[in-house]
Amino acid sequence: MRDSRSTDSVKAFTESVDLESRIAKLGALAYIDGNGQIDALTDGLLTLRYLFGLEGGTLIAGVVAPDATRTTAVDIETHLRPSCLLCKILPCY
């Protein structure tokens, strides 16, 4: 990951506290499928797929949690899309 506040062109986050701080800044946005839990195998994969440009059924195939409140690709894309909030918090490179 890069830290846009750094004076260096690239700063690696090597301490877990740095990564935890960045994740905490995401707040409710991090609950991609809306179940109130941040999970790498659901929310993380949905985020990665979205950032790689996947949409529709390909975006959600096999990764939406059983207790999710956002269960369709439209719901999830709408949640992630507002001016690409993820890109404002964790810049896409």
Image (tube, helix red, strand yellow):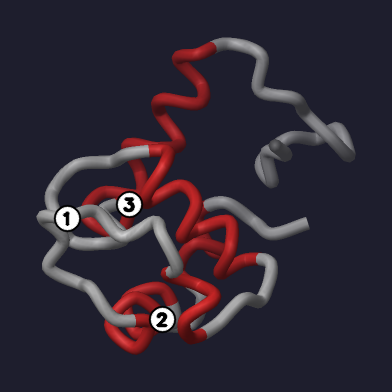
Nearest the camera: 40 or 21? 40
Closer to viewer: mark 1 or mark 2: 1
Residue 19 horizontal/vertical position (percent): 50, 26
What distance separates the C-alpha of mark 1 from that of mark 3?
A: 17 Å
Q: Kindly identify the amino acid type of the residue bearing the numbered disc 2.
A: Glu
Closer to viewer: mark 2 or mark 3: 2
Mark toward the start of the polypeptide (2 vs 3): 3
Q: Quadrant of residue 33?
A: bottom left
Determine which of the numbered discs, if any, sits on residue 66 in the image: 1
- Identify whether 4 is placed above or below 57: above
Determine which of the numbered discs, if any, sits on residue 42 in the image: none
Q: Pointer 3: what residue?
A: 30
Determine which of the numbered discs, if any, sits on residue 77 in the image: 2
Residue 91 horizontal/vertical position (percent): 64, 56
Query: Dot 2 surroundings within 10 Å: few (below 14), some, or many (20 or more)?
Result: many
Q: Are marks 1 and 3 in contact (CB under 8 Å)?
A: no
Q: Horizontal placement of 48 versus 77: left or right? A: right
Q: Kindly identify the amino acid type of the residue bearing the numbered disc 1.
A: Pro
User: In this figure, what is the number of numbered marks?
Assistant: 3
